[in-house]
Amino acid sequence: MGKELEKFKGIFMAMYSAYDDNGNVDKERVKKLARYYADKKVKGLYVGGSSGEGVLQSEEERKQVVEAVMEEVKGELTIIVHVGANSTPESVRLAQHAEKVGADAVSSIPAVYYRLSPQSVKAHWQAMIDSTNLPFIIYHIPQTTGFNLPISLFEEMAKQEKVIGIKCSSESTFELQQFKAVGGKDFLVFNGPDEQFVAGRAIGADAGIGGTYGVMPELFMKLNEYINNQELNKARELQNEVNEIIKGLLSVGSLYGACKYILHLRGVETGVPRLPMLPITDDKTKEFLKGLNDKILSLIKKIS
């Protein structure tokens, strides 16, 4: 199994949505965004997750996004498709579609809105796992789903051959370390909180999937390189600088609006996020983001 897991180790963009100017999924823009990241030499893409607004899109739209990504970068990047939806049957259909178009793995949050028991969440995930031959990656993000994954359920899931990893986006590095300890050497743990990338990797995460990586993949690839080379002081210094950028992105009230605006400044058009997520409209914020983009680009230059 170890060799097969290598393609999942590295920096994965939690890929943003890409809409036309009327807010519809734009397959050409999706392809251009996928190409932008492929050209940066990232390891892979996590498609249809939080950053990709998967839960704000229809089943058909989500399929269109995955198809466009696969048409552009299949075989070039490792593609993990987030297929979690509120209903299990929809999640299963999305998982089967991901397999059909050649994705490398599927992933899912628990269903949201209802406060579900661990048994319900297990049944939800199990239906997806059983519906394809693809590897499955649990997506743990309790601050948005309201579901705190009990270690007993995690242990049960991790024993299954198809369950190869967990994307741990909870804010506790202790929890991340516990998932690694229970999962073992051949179980993948993906660091979720971008601001804790170095801490997560240092304590046992094998890779990272992140939303802010999308405006600074070079910086996260460099952080990963530092960790792999055990250059912890350099990693810490760069993480501190990256965190100032993340703080700036979070300060404007619409994280994905901010990230998409920065890509727009670089000529990569992805439209605005879908409501209720807000676009960036006022001039003061746009000026601030121009300055932040300059800061990112100069930091990339500095570490290159």
Image (tube, helix red, strand yellow):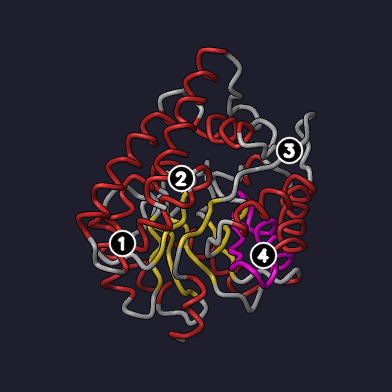
Mark in the foreground, 3 or 2: 3
Image spot of residue 180 (x, y percent):
30, 69
Q: In the rendered structure, does residue 24 fall within the stretch colored magenta? A: no
Q: Which residue is mark 3?
A: 19
Please tell me the numbered disc located at residue 95. Answer: 4
Q: Amino acid at mark 2?
A: Thr
User: Mark 4 or mark 2, which has the lower sequence index?
Assistant: 4
Q: Which residues are magenta?
A: 74-99
Kind of residue indicated by mark 4: Ala
Amino acid type indicated by mark 3: Tyr
- Residue bearing the label numbered 2: 145
Q: How far apart are the alpha carbons under marks 3 and 2?
A: 25 Å
User: Can you identify the residue that label 1 sits on?
Assistant: 226
Give how far across and how far down residue 245 sits, in percent: 38, 35
Question: Is residue 266 in sight in this rendering?
Answer: yes
As drawn, the residue found furthest toward the left would be: 233
Amino acid type, mark 1:
Tyr
Q: CA distance from mark 3 to mark 4?
A: 22 Å
Q: Earlier in the sequence, mark 1 or mark 3?
A: 3
Which of the two discs, 2 and 1, sits closer to the camera?
1
Q: CA distance from mark 4 to mark 2?
A: 20 Å
Percent coordinates x, y for residue 48 in the rendering: 62, 51
Q: Secondary structure at mark 3?
A: loop
Q: Position of residue 259 (x, y in %)?
A: 54, 35
| Rendered position, 161 above or below 117 | below
Per the image, label 1 sits on a secondary structure element best described as helix
Q: Is residue 21 left or right of residue 235?
A: right
